[in-house]
Image (cartoon, rainbow, N blue to C red):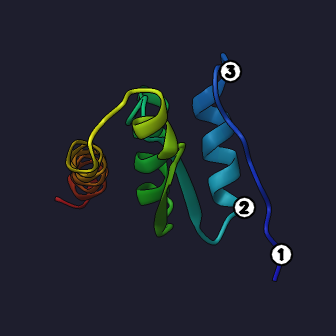
Amino acid sequence: MCVLLFVFHHYMDFCSKVSTAARLSDGALVLVDAVEGVQIQTHAVLRQACIEKLTPCLVLNKIDRLICELRMSPMQAYTRLIRIVHEVNRIIECPRQ
């Protein structure tokens, strides 16, 4: 197994880099910061993954910050995470319709 990691954020030529990387990939791990949530770049990556027929796998990162920094209760943190998952699912479903 070979894992090739592409990291894209805050680049001017973001979309073309994502498109090129997607063509070289068999799948996509999409990392989303639990505090910041889904960003514009996340939309671009998910849409490109769908166009290239890749199966995206959502990875929620920095979950500890919800409790340690934002002082969320477990239910508030759960609600935030569920909201992120639903938003990602909506983005993934749109291109298929």
- Whether residue 81 sits left or right of residue 67 in the image: it is left
Given residues 58 and 47, the one toward you in this image is: 58
How much space separates mark 1 and mark 3, taking CA atoms?
Answer: 25 Å
Residue 53 visible in image: no
Give the quadrant of the C terminus.
Answer: bottom left
Say which residue label 1 marks.
2
* Numbered badge on residue 11: 3
Pick whichever of labels 2 and 1 is earlier in the sequence.
1
User: How many other residues sit within 10 Å of disc 3, few (<14), some (14-19) or many (≥20)?
Assistant: few
Task: Find residue 12 and report its horizontal and vertical position in percent.
Answer: 66, 16
User: How many other residues sit within 10 Å of disc 2, few (<14), some (14-19) or many (≥20)?
Assistant: few
Marks 2,1: beta carbons within 8 A: no
Pick whichever of labels 2 and 3 is earlier in the sequence.
3
Say which residue label 2 marks.
24
Marks 2,3: beta carbons within 8 A: no
Task: Find residue 25 and report its horizontal and vertical position in percent.
Answer: 68, 64
- Whether residue 69 sits left or right of residue 89 in the image: it is right
Q: Amino acid at mark 2?
A: Leu
How much space separates mark 2 and mark 1, taking CA atoms?
Answer: 12 Å
Task: Find residue 66 and report its horizontal and vertical position in percent.
Answer: 41, 37
The image quarter in which residue 70 lies: top left
Given residues 51 and 77, the one toward you in this image is: 77
Tell me which residue sits at (81%, 83%) in the image. Answer: 1
Q: Amino acid at mark 3?
A: Tyr
Task: Find residue 47 and report its horizontal and vertical position in percent.
Answer: 40, 47
Outermost residue to the bottom? 1
Q: Amino acid at mark 1?
A: Cys
- Whether residue 51 sits left or right of residue 7 in the image: it is left
